[in-house]
Amino acid sequence: MIAMNYRWIVLAILMICATRGSFAQEKPKRITDDVVPGLDWQQARPESLGYSSSKLEALRSWVKTEGTSSMLVIAQGRVIFSYGDVSHPSKIASARKSVLSMLYGNYVANGTIDLDKTVKQLGLQDKQPFLPIEETATLRQLLAARSGIYLPTGSFGQQGYMPPRGSEAPGVHFVYNN
């Protein structure tokens, strides 16, 4: 189990590095035409977007050794790397932190997103309105699973250990949540 978690951590780091330019040869070129993926995704040569085919092939060699069933790397709506049968659904776990880091990282770094704003300040809402104590949770606390917002979960395994709503102040208690 520990070895498996280690592989996911290394894979997540590689994916984050790929999005932050470590696999890029130069600053990625910005494509301005719209690409809305449908049944088929457009392919692009990695170099056309500033990425390195040789570094992505090194990634391919590494994922072969880790029991990875499939992997897809998308840049600007185009496939620049594909490994395995990407049409076959795969169960993944603990991907939330890696994916959120990739999605938020650049925007936090350039100041577009302020992690210290509360859910109320950000205008976030859910199907079930936030309790007053939950409205004080910051985006940073949400991303760190320390928000104190315990909405019902669709995960059967998590239903047994989720604290009751309003029972913990934001930032005080960590609850693992996918």
Image (tube, grey):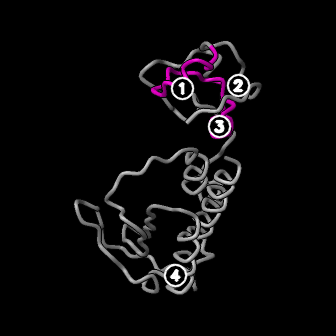
- Label number found at residue 157: 1
Q: Position of residue 138 (x, y in %)?
A: 66, 33
The answer for how far apart the CA atoms under marks 2 and 1 are is 23 Å
Q: Earlier in the sequence, mark 1 or mark 3?
A: 3
- Circle 2 or circle 3, nearest the eye: 2
- Circle 1 or circle 3, nearest the eye: 1
**Residue 8 or 78: which is nearer the viewer?**
8
Residue extending farthest left = 39
Q: Quadrant of the C terminus?
A: top right
- Label number found at residue 170: 2
Q: Position of residue 4 (x, y in %)?
A: 64, 52
Query: Dots 2 and 3: beta carbons under 8 Å?
Result: no
Query: Dots 2 and 4: beta carbons under 8 Å?
Result: no
SS of the residue under disc 1: helix
Q: Earlier in the sequence, mark 2 or mark 4?
A: 4
- What residue is drawn where x is 67% and y is 28%? 175
Q: Earlier in the sequence, mark 4 or mark 1?
A: 4
SS of the residue under disc 3: loop
The amino acid sitting under disc 3 is: Lys
Q: Is residue 23 above or below residue 139?
A: below
Q: Earlier in the sequence, mark 2 or mark 3?
A: 3
- Circle 2 or circle 4, nearest the eye: 4
Looking at the magenta stretch, what is its main secondary structure?
loop
The answer for how far apart the CA atoms under marks 4 and 1 are is 38 Å
The amino acid sitting under disc 1 is: Gly
**Residue 2 or 14: which is nearer the viewer?**
2
The magenta span reads 135-163
- Label 4, on which residue? 57
Query: Hey, which quadrant is residue 126 in on the image?
Result: top left
- Label number found at residue 117: 3
Q: Is residue 82 above or below residue 129?
A: below
- What residue is drawn where x is 55% and y is 48%? 95
